[in-house]
Image: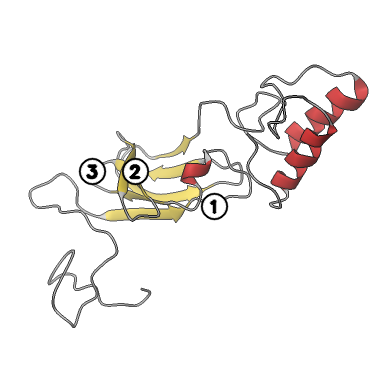
Amino acid sequence: FAGGNYGWPDTEGPTSNPAYITPLHYYPNNNAVECAIAGGTFYAPEVRQFPPLYVESYFFSDLCGGWIRRLDGNLQSNGFATGISSPVDLLVGQDGSLYSLARGAGAVVRIRWMQHLEGDVNGDSSTNDADAFYLINYLYAGGPAPVQGGDVDGNGSVNVDDLTYLIAYLLGRGPTPV
């Protein structure tokens, strides 16, 4: 809760003290490598690169632990990435990638989903307007066949319905392609 008193530095994690708010999620750091959440972001981009399971998840990193975890809708923490040198910030890019500012490496780290992306008909590892143009070229101008199959609506054939489905998704008005 914004502006709430979570008790730091007097206490960390759950508390029975009514003066403090118990956090929705915590992880113990007694004698552990972890030291502080130093970056966090919700994954809700217009162009979704990660599978639907990750949409609306909260990603957070630990400065000393060098990792990124994902907090799901059940407030369970799931491992996501490790080996990041002192991550201090997270950001979701317009391309749907997750970016981490790795202070220890002096670098911005781009994290992409490397498996097949639903709707990625041109094989460029993202689902965006280029896929719609690729389908238009294939359907109406005899262009090359879709690299990833092209059946984005899951009806068993590649036709104008796939194009309509993909455009609705890209505009945020339709379900994730299958």
Q: Position of residue 69 (x, y in %)?
A: 33, 45
Choose mark 2 or mark 3, whichever is in front: 2
Residue type, mark 3 in image: Gly
Residue 21 image-quadrant placement: bottom left
Crowd around label 2: few <14 · some 14–19 · many ≥20 (10 Å): many
Residue type, mark 2 in image: Ile
Query: Residue 44 has which mark?
Result: 1
Left or right of 56 in this view: 158: right
- Which residue was labeled with disc 2? 68
Tag 3 near tag 1, CB within 8 Å: no
Left or right of 19 in this view: 120: right
- Give the Cα distance between marks 3 and 1: 25 Å
Helix, strand or loop for disc 1: loop
Q: Is residue 62 above or below residue 8?
A: above
Tag 2 near tag 1, CB within 8 Å: no
Q: Earlier in the sequence, mark 2 or mark 1?
A: 1
- Which residue was labeled with disc 3? 65
Crowd around label 1: few <14 · some 14–19 · many ≥20 (10 Å): some
Front residue (pair 145, 99): 145
Q: Is residue 24 above or below residue 143?
A: below
Helix, strand or loop for disc 3: loop
Quadrant including the C terminus: top right
Crowd around label 3: few <14 · some 14–19 · many ≥20 (10 Å): some
Front residue (pair 177, 97): 177
Residue type, mark 1 in image: Ala
Q: Position of residue 62 (x, y in %)?
A: 28, 48
- Residue located at (75% from left, 46% from top): 168
Choose mark 3 or mark 1, whichever is in front: 1
- Give the Cα distance between marks 2 and 3: 9 Å
Q: Earlier in the sequence, mark 3 or mark 1?
A: 1
